[in-house]
Image: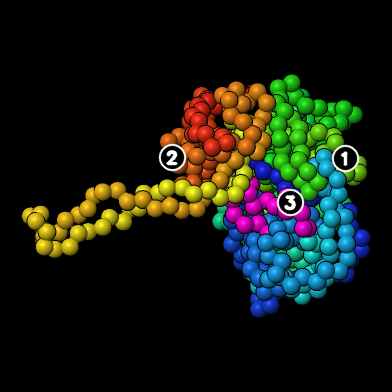
Amino acid sequence: MKKRCLVFLILFVLSLSAYTQSKYTLQNSEKDKISFKLINNLIVIPVEVNGVPLSFLLDTGVSKAIIFNFVNVSDELKINRTEEFFLRGLGEGDTVQALKSSDNIFKIGDAVNIEQDVFTIFDPSLNFTPQLGIPIHGIIGYDLLKDFVVEINYSKKQIVLHDPDFYQPKKCKKCETFNLDFSTKKPFINGSVAIRDNEKSVPVKLLIDSGGSDALWLFKDKEHNINVPTRYFDDFLGRGLSGSVYGKRSKISRFSIGSFTLESVNTAFPDSTSIAFAKKFKERNGSLGGEILKRFNVIFDYSNKKITLRKNSSFKEPFYYNKSGISLEHSGMRVVKELDKKQAKMPYGTTNNSAGGNIINLSKSYKYVLAPSLAIVELRKGSPAEKAGLRLDDIILSVNNKDVHLYSIQEVIQLFYGPDGKRVRMIIDRNGVQMKFSFQLESMF
């Protein structure tokens, strides 16, 4: 079964003052390989901060390192509180308070920076662990990427950091190299989109955003003929630094970069209030996210303002989307009853005449364990789940006759990306009362 893409968003658009330049260097070699996890099209890498092992998102859309799960690791990190800042990102909310700390030691694979600036956010609501299902402590982008030629092999889930002074590109007939433009230390690429069939393509300049799991975001612009297609639905697009982002989801006819063309591409059109800060860069028409990036193996060369793309085995996969209308998060813990698979054996000397004189006790034994609660945190109006009667804050206990704690959160969400007509059965807890629901997945296009 093909691995289906999921939708998630982490987009930060920061406006920061000048900072002390710092540099990553490879300690023992000219290159280093780092394995990563790909979760909801997002790259999760191991990062050691002041000697403490953490997990960060590698996000080309951010200029500075940020720790946003700080309250859970503050005692270990020993971060000096220095300057107070207010950060602004995507979303409908206000700025977020953060403290800037300098001269932190960051180690990523064999790459080390002993003067890393980091912005720590104390707001506990800005915690992206519940959406991804694994601990996520922070995010890093430009600070790391600027110092290396960086290969991202989505197929192997591996990053290679090359010392630019020793890097020799391999010959690659199927590769194409494109120019990058930079604004506020974020990379932009030129492409083209055709919104509808039989419609002429129009040029677009897009932020390359490995921290957004959608395929494309386009900013509505009548002057440049970037309009929402006739068939769309309103949806929750994700959560940014300044709050939730909403907009319209649809499909456009095609998207192209050079000779690479993708058809029937999932595209989101965020509401203008959520992207007001991002649109201050007037040339920007949207974002190119992880659902497209994962279809290539990518080489970033920031020092020469180049990006090289080569199609991988995911290139021709269809673009799926969540047909249920449900967005989920981990929400606290609950006690669950599990069958203990260890069966006790009775000793010799019983009256049973079974072979070997052993009696196997077949009575069921149970144990109680703690497992994350999985809650509905967004519910699309008019969606199959809403029409079936599901509500916000419902706690899911089982899906399709399988206890939900036996799934990862990604596996549960994958069930919502199935074919039209697929039935999803749930048992939920609503204020202490268990209830059963059933609905069928429906295409919105």
Instruction: Identify the residue at image location x=88%, y=40%.
Output: 276
Closer to us: 172 or 382: 382
Q: Mark 3 points at which residue?
A: 126
Whole-Å distance between the Cαs marked 3 and 1? 20 Å
- State the image quarter where residue 444 is shown: top right
**Residue 65 in which image quadrant:** bottom right
Q: Can residue 73 be seen in this view?
A: yes
The Cα–Cα distance between marks 3 and 2, rounded to whole angstroms, is 31 Å
How many numbered marks does the figure carry?
3
| Image: magenta residue range | 121-142
Q: Type of residue at label 3?
A: Leu
Q: Horizontal placement of 377 versus 122: left or right?
A: left
Q: Is residue 363 left or right of residue 40?
A: left
Q: Is residue 124 magenta?
A: yes
Name the residue at 74% across, 21% down: 230
For badge 2, the amino acid type reads Lys
* Crowd around label 3: few <14 · some 14–19 · many ≥20 (10 Å): some
Q: Tag 1: Cα neighbours inside 10 Å, few (<14), some, or many (≥20)? A: some
Q: Is mark 2 on a helix, strand or loop?
A: strand
Residue lying farthest bottom?
28
Q: In which quarter of the image is the C terminus?
A: top right
Residue 193 at least partly seen: no
Q: Is mark 1 on a helix, strand or loop?
A: loop
The residue singled out by tag 1 in the image is 276
Residue 442 in the image, given as x and y percentages of width and height: 57, 24
Q: Is residue 365 magenta?
A: no
Question: Which badge, 3 or 1, is on the more N-terminal residue?
Answer: 3
Q: Who comes first in sequence, dot 3 or dot 2?
A: 3
